[in-house]
Image (cartoon, rainbow, N blue to C red):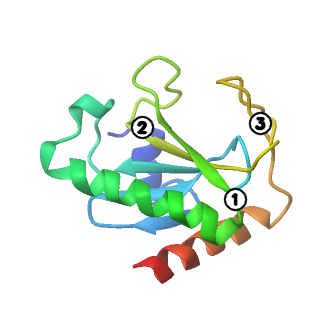
Amino acid sequence: MADCVFCSILAGDLEADLVLEEPAFAAFLDQRPVFKGHVLLVPRTHVVTLPELPAEHRDGFLAAAQRLATAVVEGLGAQGSFVAINNTVSQSVPHLHLHVVPRTKGDGLRGFFWPRTKYAAGERADYAARLRDALQRSA
């Protein structure tokens, strides 16, 4: 879809720090992360909400989410993760995306009032590389 930010990333028209590329899915770092290493998993097929995800992609989508949740622990040293999907409400980009947010005890995340942070120069590429390495080790 021409006016979709995520479709533009998937097409290579917009820059993103990709951490996972599969035939049906891709994952990249969120441009406005809750915490550093916050990843978005998206289907390559443009669908807006989870109910629209074709049945043949459901298992693969969840399997990729599991791999990403493991990667934020193994690759970034997080103690766990927060995994979420917004459907329409609070969905800033109208393309299905699953958030994998690295978590540590005392990180300040309270409910759904997410503080936002920024990467220092060159830091996003480092986080993306660490996640790619963790995903490759688990493959």
Amino acid residing under circle 3: Arg
Quarter the C terminus occupies: bottom left
Q: Residues within 10 Å of mark 1 (few under 14, many from 20)?
A: some
| Count of marks placed on residues | 3
Q: Earlier in the sequence, mark 1 or mark 3?
A: 1
Q: Earlier in the sequence, mark 2 or mark 1?
A: 2
Q: Which numbered disc, 2 or 1, marks the residue closer to the eye?
A: 1
Task: Give 95 or 138, whichever is nearer the viewer.
Answer: 138
Image coords of residue 110 (percent x, y) = 73, 27
Q: Quadrant of residue 129?
A: bottom right
> Marks 3/2: CA distance?
23 Å
Q: Residue furthest bottom?
A: 137
Above or below, comparing residue 106 to residue 91 in the picture: below
Residue tagged 1: 78
Q: What secondary structure is found at the residue carrying circle 1?
A: loop
Q: What residue do we see at 41% from left, 20% from top?
A: 88
Q: Which mark is residue 116?
A: 3
> Marks 1/3: CA distance?
17 Å
Task: Give 24 or 101, whichever is nearer the viewer.
Answer: 101
Image coords of residue 75 (percent x, y) = 64, 71
Residue tagged 2: 4
Q: Residue furthest top?
A: 89
Q: Which numbered disc, 1 or 3, marks the residue closer to the eye?
A: 1
Amino acid residing under circle 1: Ala
Amino acid residing under circle 2: Cys
Q: Quadrant of residue 107?
A: top right
Q: What residue do we see at 16% from left, 42% from top?
A: 54
Image coords of residue 58 (percent x, y) = 23, 47
